[in-house]
Every structure is written in C-alpha cells, then in structure tokens.
C-alpha cells in the first residue's frame, strides 16, 4: 500500500526536505509504507545538482534552497501542485530511466483527464504542451512547460518528484532560467483556459498514479 497525503496550507521547503529524507530512510531501513505527498510551497526557488549560477537571474527575489536533487533551478509557489513520491524503486524494477519515464507518464495521464495533450521532449526535462495559440518559433510550434520533474534516489528509494502548474503566478518563473531552458515558456492549466482546481488535479493524480504505479501498472511493485 502507498500512503496518500494531501497537505493543507503552505509547507516550508526545509521542513518538506526533512520529512522526505526521514520517510525515505524509514522505507529502506524499516519497511515503512511508501508515500505520495501532495502540497504547495510558499514562493521559492530550488537549485538541483546541475544548477548553473548564471541561471539564477534574480537571487534576491525569493529564498533559494539547495534541493540536493537532480536538475537545475525551478520555482515552487502557491497554485502549483507539488507531488513528492517516496517509493521503493528496487521493488519497481530497479531501473532509474524507466522510473523517470513512469513519473512523466503519471503527469501525462493526469493531464489527459483535462483533455490536455502533454508530451515528453528528448533532451528537455519536464512535460510539455504545444501552444497552437502562439506563433511558431524558428524550430517549430511554440511549446511551454506545464510540469517539472526532479528526483533523488537514496539506496533505491526515491524522493522529490513532480510539480504541475495549476494556477501559479507565472511571472515568478522570471527570476530563473527554468531547468536551464530559455528557448521555451512556462504555462499552467488555468493559463491554457481550463478552470481546474487543485482538488480536481489531486483526483486526476491519484487515478493516474494507480494506472502507472499501482498493481498491474508498468511501474507496480514486483
């Protein structure tokens, strides 16, 4: 069984990091239940292990935290659903690349519940949508990121996870180069014209999680 926790209010990032690390340790050492933790943070930036200093454009805009996860800079804040996944990857195939594929698939299937066609892009972290309402760029149709993925494994237990832009203030992404990608924009479900609530997204995430990580899913426990 996977515990499913929906957190009220805004969770400070250091508190979330301590909780994730403690739960990951308990899963590995004590056989604790896996956990999916849905929450929102106050406005902040996090730096992954590949973050480049020049991509932090406005270092004094919000607090900046060393996330100790893979990836570069990202923004978290109100209106963004953060889904932290503390899962036993060793019981799910012990294949890091496939596990990341599973996180992407989780988001893609959840967004499909709102008739959003979200896609992967080779060489670009995150989940993307094509913007038919924007002029195409020099290399093809305009594309915006709608969800970010950041991950860390400790002895084959995952923590960190995904974040989906439901209705955040998109101008707050302007203080960084999100995930080191400057050629494309950032969007949200509400920005796409969809009156989706956080509760709607939570329901879609739970359904999609069962499809991907539940019994019988491609990343179910073995």
Image (spheres, rainbow, N blue to C red):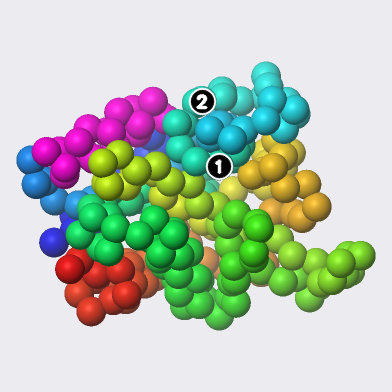
SS label for mark 2: strand
Instruction: State the image coordinates of residue 64 (x, y, percent, origin top left).
Output: 56, 24
The magenta segment? 12-29
Q: From the viewer's side, name the closer residue of 130 and 179.
A: 179
Q: Which residue is mark 1?
A: 71
Q: Who's the residue at 41% across and 36% down the image?
A: 10
Q: Nearer the viewer, mark 2 or mark 1?
A: 1
Q: From the viewer's side, name the closer residue of 162 and 43.
A: 162
Q: From the viewer's side, name the closer residue of 155 and 51.
A: 155
Q: Main secondary structure of the magenta part?
A: helix
SS label for mark 1: loop
User: Quick check: 121 above or below 27?
Assistant: below
Instruction: State the image coordinates of residue 55 (x, y, percent, origin top left).
Output: 72, 32
Q: Who's the residue at 53% across and 33% down the image?
A: 49
User: Quick check: 52 above or below 81?
Assistant: above
Q: Which residue is mark 2?
A: 65
């Amino acid at each position: 069984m996977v515990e499913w926790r929906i957190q009220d209010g805004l969770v400070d990032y250091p508190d979330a990091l301590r909780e994730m690390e403690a739960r990951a340790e308990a899963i590995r050492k004590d056989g604790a239940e896996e956990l999916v933790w849905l929450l929102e943070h106050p406005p902040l930036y996090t730096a992954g292990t590949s973050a480049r200093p020049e991509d932090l454009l406005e270092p004094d805009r919000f607090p900046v935290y060393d996330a100790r996860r893979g990836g570069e800079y990202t923004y978290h804040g109100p209106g963004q659903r953060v889904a932290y996944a503390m899962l036993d990857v060793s019981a799910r195939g012990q294949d890091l690349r496939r596990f990341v594929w599973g996180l992407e698939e989780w988001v893609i299937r959840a967004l499909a519940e709102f008739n959003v066609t979200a896609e992967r892009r080779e060489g670009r972290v995150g989940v993307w949508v094509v913007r038919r309402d924007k002029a195409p760029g020099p290399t093809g149709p305009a594309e915006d990121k709608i969800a970010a993925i950041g991950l860390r494994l400790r002895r084959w237990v995952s923590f960190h996870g995904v974040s989906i832009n439901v209705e955040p203030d998109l101008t707050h992404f302007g203080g960084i180069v999100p995930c080191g990608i400057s050629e494309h924009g950032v969007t949200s479900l509400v920005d796409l014209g969809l009156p989706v609530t956080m509760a709607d997204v939570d329901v879609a995430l739970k359904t999609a999680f069962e499809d991907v990580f539940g019994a019988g899913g491609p990343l179910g426990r073995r």
